[in-house]
C-alpha cells in the first residue's frame, strides 16, 4: 500500500489554501458530532411500535411460560428462533439475554478469568499473563474489556477479508499466553470488512499453543446492510465444529442497532459445552432475563423476514449519509494522496486513514472547529495507533445536512494537517 503524503511541490499552495478554508470553517461556530455509532432519532422511531407490545393479555410464551415471572435463563424460544435463522445457528445453541451484547462478552472473559473455560487447565486469572490478539483498527470497547480484566493486548493487522489470519496463526502457534482474539465478522467496526469463509476456516482450525483458545466472534452487524449486496459472513460455529474445535468460537449479537440500543436484546451462540459453561456461571448472577422484552421483540418482528424488512427501513435512513461521506471524501480528497477510506457495504462506520503522524492533529483541528470526531488512537489497543493515521467516522447519528457540513470540514482538516506535515509546520 502506498504511503499517504502530500507531494512536496503542492505543499505550500495547499497549506495557504487550507489555512484560509480552515479559518472560514472555524468562523461558522459549528457544533457537530461524528463520534459514536449511534442510531439517529429517525431510526429509533422505526421501532416505536415496541411501546405497544406485548399486547395486553399476551403474557405467555408459545410454550406456556409466563414472561412476567422469574426463570428461563435461555431466553424466550420464539425470539431465539428468529435470530437463530438470521445468525445461521441452531436455536438450541442460542441464548437471549439482556440489552447489551457487550455485557455477554465482558462476562465471558470475566468468567474465564475467574473460573477458566472448558478445556482449560485453570482460571485465566491464575495465569501469569493472558494475551488477546486484537485485529486493528478495531472496536475500542473490546479493548476496554481486556484492559479492565488485565488481559494484555497485541494488535494484528486487518485485511479486506477480516483479520490477518496468517499473522494470527503465526503468533498463536507458540505462545500459550494467547488465550483468544476478537473478530467482528460482518461489516467490522470500523473498516467494514467481512470475514470470508477461507479466513474463518483458518482462524477456527489454526493450531494454538493454548488448549483453551477462544475467538469472541462479535457479529454485531450481521443484518445491517447498506446495499443490495447483502453479505453473509462465514459460519464460524459450524466451521469450528468441522475443524474439531467446536468450543473455540463464541458468537455475539444484539438488537441494539435494530431496535433500541438502550432496551434491546442480546444473543450468545456457542457450542453445547460453552453454552452450559456460560449458563452455569450466569445462573449465579441472574434468575432469568427480561422475557417481557423478548416477547415484545418477537411480536414486533413476527419472523426473520420481519427483521430483514425492518433493516431495509434503517438502510433507507442511513445509506444516504454514507453516500454523502463517500462523495465528499472523493470530491475533496480523491487523487490528493493524503487519505484513503473504506466504502462499507454495511455496518456503522467509515475508516479513514490520513497521512501518518496527523490523525491526532486532524481530530484536534476538527474539535477546534466544532466537529467532534472519535479520538485518534481509539481504534487501537491502549488508544495507541502506532502510526497516528487512523480515524473512525460514524455518520449515522447526525441529520444528513450535518453529515455533509461535518465531512467537508473533516476534509479541510485532513488537507491542512497533511500540508503542515509536508512543510514541517505540524505543531508538536
Ligand atoms: N460490538 C461492536 C462491534 C459494536 O460496534 C458495538 C456498538 N458500537 C457493540 C458490540 C455494542 O453492542 P451492544 O449494544 O449489544 O452491547
Image (spheres, rainbow, N blue to C red):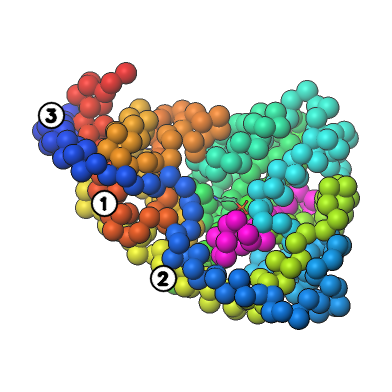
Q: Are marks 2 and 1 in contact (CB under 8 Å)?
A: no
Label placed on residue 316: 2
Q: Is residue 384 left or right of residue 58?
A: left
* Label located before the other in sequence (1 or 3): 3
Residue hosting label 3:
12
Residue at figure coordinates x 61%, y 36% from the top left = 144
Q: Which residues are magenta?
A: 245-265
Q: Is residue 275 left or right of residue 408?
A: right
Callout 3: SS: helix
- In the image, 202 versus 377, the foreground residue is 377
Q: Residues within 10 Å of mark 3 (few under 14, many from 20)?
A: some
* Label located before the other in sequence (2 or 1): 2
> Is residue 257 shown in magenta?
yes
The mark tally for this picture is 3
Label placed on residue 2: none
Figure quadrant of residue 78: bottom right
Residue 286 rendering spot, x and y as whole percentages: 83, 52
* Label located before the other in sequence (3 or 2): 3
Residue 385 seen in the figure = yes
Amino acid at each position: 500500500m502506498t504511503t499517504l503524503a502530500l507531494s512536496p511541490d503542492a505543499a505550500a499552495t495547499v497549506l495557504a489554501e487550507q489555512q484560509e478554508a480552515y479559518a472560514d470553517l472555524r468562523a461558522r461556530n459549528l457544533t457537530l458530532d461524528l463520534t459514536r455509532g449511534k442510531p439517529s432519532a429517525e431510526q429509533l422511531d422505526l421501532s416505536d411500535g415496541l411501546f405497544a407490545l406485548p399486547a395486553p393479555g399476551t403474557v405467555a410464551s408459545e410454550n406456556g411460560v409466563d414472561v412476567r415471572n422469574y426463570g428461563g435463563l435461555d431466553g424466550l424460544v420464539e425470539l431465539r428462533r428468529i435470530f437463530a435463522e438470521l445468525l445461521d445457528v441452531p436455536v438450541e445453541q442460542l441464548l437471549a439475554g439482556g440489552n447489551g451484547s457487550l455485557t455477554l462478552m465482558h462476562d465471558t472473559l470475566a468468567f474465564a478469568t475467574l473460573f477458566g473455560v472448558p478445556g482449560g487447565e485453570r482460571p485465566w486469572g491464575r495465569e501469569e499473563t493472558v494475551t488477546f490478539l486484537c485485529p486493528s483498527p478495531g472496536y475500542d470497547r473490546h479493548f476496554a474489556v481486556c484492559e479492565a480484566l488485565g488481559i494484555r493486548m497485541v494488535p494484528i493487522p486487518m485485511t479486506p477479508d477480516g483479520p490477518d489470519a496468517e499473522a494470527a496463526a503465526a503468533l498463536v502457534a507458540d505462545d500459550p499466553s494467547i488465550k483468544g482474539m476478537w473478530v467482528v465478522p460482518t461489516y467490522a467496526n470500523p473498516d467494514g470488512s467481512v470475514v470470508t469463509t477461507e479466513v474463518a476456516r483458518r482462524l477456527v482450525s489454526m493450531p494454538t499453543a493454548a488448549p483453551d483458545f477462544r475467538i469472541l466472534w462479535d457479529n454485531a452487524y450481521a443484518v445491517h446492510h447498506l446495499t443490495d449486496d447483502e453479505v453473509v459472513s462465514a459460519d464460524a460455529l459450524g466451521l469450528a465444529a468441522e475443524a474439531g474445535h467446536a468450543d473455540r468460537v463464541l458468537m455475539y449479537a444484539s438488537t441494539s442497532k435494530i431496535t433500541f440500543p438502550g432496551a434491546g436484546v442480546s444473543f450468545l451462540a456457542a457450542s453445547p459445552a460453552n453454552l452450559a459453561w456460560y449458563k452455569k456461571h450466569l445462573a449465579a448472577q441472574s434468575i432469568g432475563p427480561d422475557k417481557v422484552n423478548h416477547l415484545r421483540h418477537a411480536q414486533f418482528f413476527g419472523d426473520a423476514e420481519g427483521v430483514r424488512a425492518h433493516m431495509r427501513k434503517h438502510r433507507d435512513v442511513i445509506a444516504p449519509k454514507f453516500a454523502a461521506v463517500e462523495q465528499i471524501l472523493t470530491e475533496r480528497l480523491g487523487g490528493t494522496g493524503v487519505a484513503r477510506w473504506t466504502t462499507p457495504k454495511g455496518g456503522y462506520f467509515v475508516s479513514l486513514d490520513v497521512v501518518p503522524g496527523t490523525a491526532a492533529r486532524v481530530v484536534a483541528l476538527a474539535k477546534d472547529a466544532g466537529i467532534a470526531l472519535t479520538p485518534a488512537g481509539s481504534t487501537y489497543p491502549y488508544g495507541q495507533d502506532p502510526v497516528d493515521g487512523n480515524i473512525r467516522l460514524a455518520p449515522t447519528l447526525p441529520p444528513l445536512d450535518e453529515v455533509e457540513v461535518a465531512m467537508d470540514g473533516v476534509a479541510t482538516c485532513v488537507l491542512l494537517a497533511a500540508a503542515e506535515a509536508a512543510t514541517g509546520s505540524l505543531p508538536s
